[in-house]
């Protein structure tokens, strides 16, 4: 939002300096992004005269100008078509810096010396006011400063950054109101309405098809107007902020928009065929807009149309065919309210970033519809003459003010700042609130321009903002142990897991808690309850039911950038819908891709496999003090996004702790991956029940280890034998394979020799009879289930 200091002081009666205003604006939350003081940037430019101009011998589009500064004659090469003998111009001598930062140097252009530059208005940062270089009046004094002829350009330009909730500050008047409330002057009242004596009939009727998309529209017809150039004061305002002056009629609506945040539009009434209607666009309708671009509209767009054609894209931009130009003599002025969400969606879809859209999508003053039209009417009649009709109104311009009961005690409890009741009332009334005392509370009626004020906390923010956040007292937190920040046991465990996985070569990443529904359906059926109504992107339209899709998506993105060996993990929530309610569970997931080590001559290369994922998962389980030898590996209950023959589920006491394995080839193909991706998932909720991990207590007594070697059929799964041995007795704590032997003799007989080490441990010292009994159980069970022989 740009405005000049003089523009601000049209509405703010203040003697405050530019520096005071700048600091106060920032403290109010209206951050000053820049202040342009043209007395500094344009101070070096002087007035000169072209004594002679002739064709450059080596360039068709260049002219050589002999230029008098009043003290010397300079040779300057110029490309402007209007560079000619006898005109006064603006000169930048070599050593001068243009507003865009370019330094003018002594140079040669196509072999001819050039000792400066003849400037256009665009090169001086004044907008494109004409083609070619600036032509000054013949009365301009040779050698004088350019600014001596344009004192209005010494008016500083302030640019502030407006937060999306402060639609009222997209007008200079709203900014002046904030400064007045902060004690930097007095807000001037709005100009009084003029009673128009000669009202003429209005030949144009208006209609709104749906008041949800357009709650109200106000119109007024003008006849006998004479569109012309704007007066100097208005052109100077627009020139100062870098905007072009178009014509009096258009400039008036822009002035009301910039001054009061009230977008307006003027139609050439002679181009309106019949009456006006606000409606949704029909399919395949088109509009050639004022920016000379043609837009293909959809049924989601709001338009203003007559009986035959679309005249404007409502709240965003008018149409070229119904625009007002210098020959215009009849005008229809439109002031309306439009649905914010629809304006935003239409602007984004068609990529139109207009001043009107900027204000409508942030919320305009709902009571300023007629006031804004009245201010514009006064200026139209003053500058362009003519007569006007009564207003025609469609919809309702009535507005019901919000009321908020505000207790000052809440201010002190939330901020530590104490403000007296009458001081709080004074501040809020300067901001436009109507306040009534209610014991130690205030009943505040919210002004129509403050769409962002809804709850008492919003009023607290206003009081803190106006008083300055700098005066909020700094309080130390109590030092009681009860108030000290303490990590939960689960948080401590998760931090430890992060360290373990990072030490194992995985990189922690943080991805969105939502994802593309196209990726989501590869992993699980789409649940409509998890869809996002208003996603920030069409690729992030559903809450994630698994972390793995987001992690797998990172693999091709990094691999395509020549990163060969990848390993990622993430700790975060996943979302499900069960029993008609949302459920959120903590998951630790990781993926690996490529080789386990970088190419080198010390070690043989090996691609990652499911055993690497298994090791990652087991490292996590060890942090929870879970003895992995007591866990079972199962190929049932696996998610369908794992390879059915190269994955497993890890269970303990029938509770699923996690999954590991190779991602299904179908999914790898969808992500266009050149080789396999292995992954793991750990279900944190099943590892921690409240604050207790589901691990076995550590015994204080000596364990006993026994080894068993069995002859097994070649097709017998060793993992199934290990699980069977574990089930033989509760005192069996660990089972591991330490040898697999096979030779031609065993192979020919369809056998293999597998040796198992079994660890026994009890809450007492085991004697020989207990050990022998358990050993017999193990041998009998394996022989019976697998037709094995003890070697």
Image (tube, grey):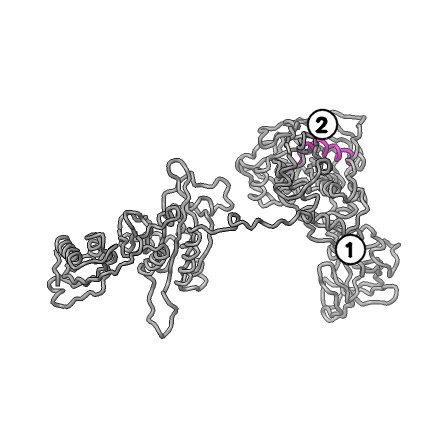
- 1 or 2: tag closer to the N-terminus: 1
| Residue placed under numbered mark 1 in the picture | 38
Q: Quick check: can you spot residue 68?
A: yes
Question: Residue at point 68% right, 40% down?
Answer: 168
Q: Could you tell me residue 82's position as x and y percent? A: 78, 57
Considering depth in this image, is 469 or 663 the residue closer to the camera? 469
Considering depth in this image, is 377 or 762 the residue closer to the camera? 762
| Badge 2 density bin: few <14, some 14–19, many ≥20, Cα 10 Å | some
Say the numbered circle drawn on residue 391.
2
Q: Could you tell me residue 526's position as x and y percent? A: 39, 42
Question: Per the image, is 442 magenta?
Answer: no
The count of marks equals 2
Magenta-tinted stretch: 363-380
Compared with 708, 389 (above or below) is above
In this picture, residue 423 sits left or right of residue 632: right
| Badge 1 density bin: few <14, some 14–19, many ≥20, Cα 10 Å | many
In this picture, residue 276 sits left or right of residue 237: left
Considering depth in this image, is 437 or 699 the residue closer to the camera? 699
């Amino acid at each position: 939002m740009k405005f000049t200091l003089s523009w601000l002081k049209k509405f703010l009666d203040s003697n405050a300096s530019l520096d005071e205003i700048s600091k106060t604006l920032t403290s109010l939350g209206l951050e000053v992004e820049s202040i342009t003081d043209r007395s500094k940037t344009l101070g070096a430019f002087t007035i000169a005269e072209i004594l002679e101009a002739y064709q450059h011998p080596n360039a068709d589009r260049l002219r050589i100008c002999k230029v008098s500064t009043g003290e010397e004659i300079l040779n300057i090469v110029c490309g402007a078509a209007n560079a000619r003998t006898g005109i006064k111009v603006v000169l930048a001598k070599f050593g001068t810096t243009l507003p865009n930062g370019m330094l003018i140097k002594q140079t040669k252009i196509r072999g001819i010396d050039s000792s400066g530059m003849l400037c256009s208005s665009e090169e001086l940062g004044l907008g494109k006011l004409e083609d070619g270089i600036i032509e000054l009046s013949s009365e301009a004094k040779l050698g004088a400063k350019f600014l001596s002829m344009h004192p209005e350009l010494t008016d500083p330009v302030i640019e502030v950054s407006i937060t999306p909730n402060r639609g009222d500050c997209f007008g200079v008047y709203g900014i002046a109101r904030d400064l007045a409330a902060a004690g930097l002057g007095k807000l001037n009242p709005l100009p009084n309405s003029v009673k128009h004596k000669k009202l003429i009939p209005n030949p144009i009727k208006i209609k709104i098809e749906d008041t949800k998309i357009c709650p109200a529209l106000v119109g007024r017809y003008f006849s006998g107007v004479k569109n012309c150039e704007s007066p100097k004061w208005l052109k100077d305002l627009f020139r100062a902020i870098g905007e072009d002056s178009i014509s009096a009629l258009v400039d008036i609506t822009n002035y009301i928009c910039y001054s009061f945040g009230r977008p307006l539009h003027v139609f050439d009434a002679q181009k309106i065929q019949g009456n006006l209607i606000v409606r949704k666009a029909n399919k395949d309708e088109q509009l050639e807009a004022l920016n000379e671009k043609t837009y293909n509209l959809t049924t989601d767009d709001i338009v203003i149309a007559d009986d035959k054609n679309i005249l404007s894209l409502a709240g965003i931009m008018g149409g070229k065919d119904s625009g007002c130009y210098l020959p215009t003599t009849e005008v229809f002025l439109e002031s309306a309210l439009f649905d914010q969400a629809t304006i935003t969606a239409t602007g984004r879809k068609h990529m139109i970033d207009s001043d009107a859209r900027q204000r409508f999508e942030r919320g305009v003053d709902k009571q300023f519809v007629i006031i804004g039209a009245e201010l514009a009417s006064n200026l139209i009649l003053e500058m362009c003459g003519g007569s006007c009709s009564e207003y025609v109104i469609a919809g309702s311009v009535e507005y019901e003010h919000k009321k908020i009961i505000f207790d000052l005690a809440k201010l002190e409890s939330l901020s530590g700042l104490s403000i007296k009741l009458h001081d709080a009332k004074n501040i809020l009334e300067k901001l436009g609130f109507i306040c009534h005392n209610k014991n130690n509370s205030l009943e505040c009626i919210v002004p129509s321009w403050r769409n962002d004020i809804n709850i008492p906390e919003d009023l607290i923010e206003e009081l803190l903002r106006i008083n300055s956040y700098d005066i909020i007292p700094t309080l130390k937190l109590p030092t009681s142990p009860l108030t000290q920040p303490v990590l939960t046991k689960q948080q401590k465990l998760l931090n430890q897991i992060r360290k373990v996985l990072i030490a194992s070569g995985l990189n922690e990443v943080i991805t969105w808690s939502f994802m593309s529904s196209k990726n989501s359906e590869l992993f699980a059926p789409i649940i409509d309850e998890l869809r996002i109504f208003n996603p920030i992107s069409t690729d992030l339209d559903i809450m994630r039911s698994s972390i793995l899709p987001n992690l797998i998506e990172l693999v091709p993105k990094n691999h395509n950038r020549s990163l060969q060996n990848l390993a990622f993990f993430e700790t975060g929530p996943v979302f499900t819908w069960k029993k008609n309610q949302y459920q959120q569970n903590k998951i630790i997931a990781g993926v690996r891709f490529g080789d386990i080590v970088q190419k080198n001559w010390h070690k043989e290369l090996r691609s990652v496999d499911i055993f690497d994922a298994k090791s990652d998962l087991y490292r996590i389980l060890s942090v929870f003090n879970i003895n992995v030898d007591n866990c079972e590996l199962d190929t049932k209950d696996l998610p369908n996004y794992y390879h059915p023959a190269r994955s497993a589920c890890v269970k303990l006491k029938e509770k699923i702790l996690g999954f590991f394995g190779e991602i299904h080839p179908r999914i790898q193909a969808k992500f266009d991956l050149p080789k396999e991706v292995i992954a793991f998932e750990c279900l944190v909720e099943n590892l921690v029940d409240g604050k207790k991990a589901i691990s076995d207590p550590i015994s204080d007594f000596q364990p006993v280890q026994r080894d068993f070697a069995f002859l097994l059929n070649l097709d017998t799964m060793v993992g199934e034998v290990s699980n069977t041995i574990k089930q033989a007795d509760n005192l069996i704590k660990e089972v591991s394979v330490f040898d697999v032997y096979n030779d031609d003799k065993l192979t020919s007989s369809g056998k293999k020799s597998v040796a198992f080490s079994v660890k026994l441990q009890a809450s007492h010292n085991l004697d020989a009879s207990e050990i022998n009994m358990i050993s017999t159980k193990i041998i009998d069970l394996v022989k019976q289930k697998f037709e094995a022989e003890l070697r």
